[in-house]
Image (cartoon, rainbow, N blue to C red):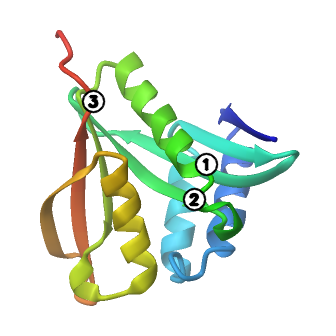
Amino acid sequence: MIKFETITAADVKTDICNTILRELPGWFGIEESIMDYVKTVRQVPVYAAYDGERPIGFAAIKTHNEYSAEVCVMGVLEGYHRQGVGSQLIKLCEDYCLTNQKEFLTVKTLDSSAEYEPYEKTRNFYSKMGFIPLEVFPLHWDKINPCLFLAKHIGKVEK
């Protein structure tokens, strides 16, 4: 049975992030990026999915301002794709936004102009979750990895 938890211990966050990203080389194959994500998750809320005691997915959420938070890194082991794990992790991120009065949840991913099949699945997933593409930043990461910025309106928040 799949269970979901909020992870608060920095070392547990980094272990989960490091382990899962390294098992997803089609999405996370740049060592420097993996290390940046591992460093980032220490400081931000992290939700993890477990199959028994084994972590199988996680999502980390970073607040940018009073209106928005970002899924700054997320990964689900391939054997668990299309089983609702990613959807539930996004739901937890949405709940975070509601609890913390954030109107928008955002995410960055590889743009379709890069023509890389694994990210076609990623973009389809985010679309299914209600994210809409807002802008492409061709040099955010580098020339061969154009960044697609997507957002989802969570709800109007009274300030």
Count every numbered label the image shows and give the total. 3
Identified by mark 2, the residue type is Arg
User: Cβ–Cβ below 8 Å for labels 1 and 2?
Assistant: no
* Among the two numbered marks 2 and 3 on one chain, the one whose residue lies closer to the N terminus: 2
| Picture layout, residue 25 above or below residue 59 | below
Report x, y in % for residue 61.
44, 42
Residue identified by numbered label 2: 82
Q: Please tell me the numbered disc located at residue 21.
A: none
Q: How far apart are labels 3 and 1 at the CA level?
A: 20 Å
Give neighbour class at mark 1: few <14, some 14-19, many 20+ (Cα, 10 Å): many
Residue found 21% across the figure and 84% down from its top: 113
Whether residue 43 can be seen here: no
Q: Please tell me the numbered disc located at residue 154.
A: 3
SS class of the residue under badge 2? loop
Q: How far apart are labels 2 and 3 at the CA level?
A: 23 Å
Identified by mark 1, the residue type is Val
Report x, y in % for residue 37.
51, 61
Q: Mark 2 or mark 3: which is in front?
A: 2
Residue found 51% across the figure and 33% down from its top: 92
Image-based side of 62 in relation to 88, left or right: left
Q: Nearer the viewer, residue 105 or 34?
A: 105
Question: Which residue extends farthest left?
Answer: 135
Report x, y in % for residue 133.
18, 58
- For the N terminus, the image quarter is top right
Q: Please tell me the numbered disc located at residue 85.
A: 1
Identified by mark 3, the residue type is Ile
| Picture layout, residue 50 above or below residue 134 | above
* Res 138 → quadrant: bottom left
SS class of the residue under badge 3? loop
SS class of the residue under badge 1? helix
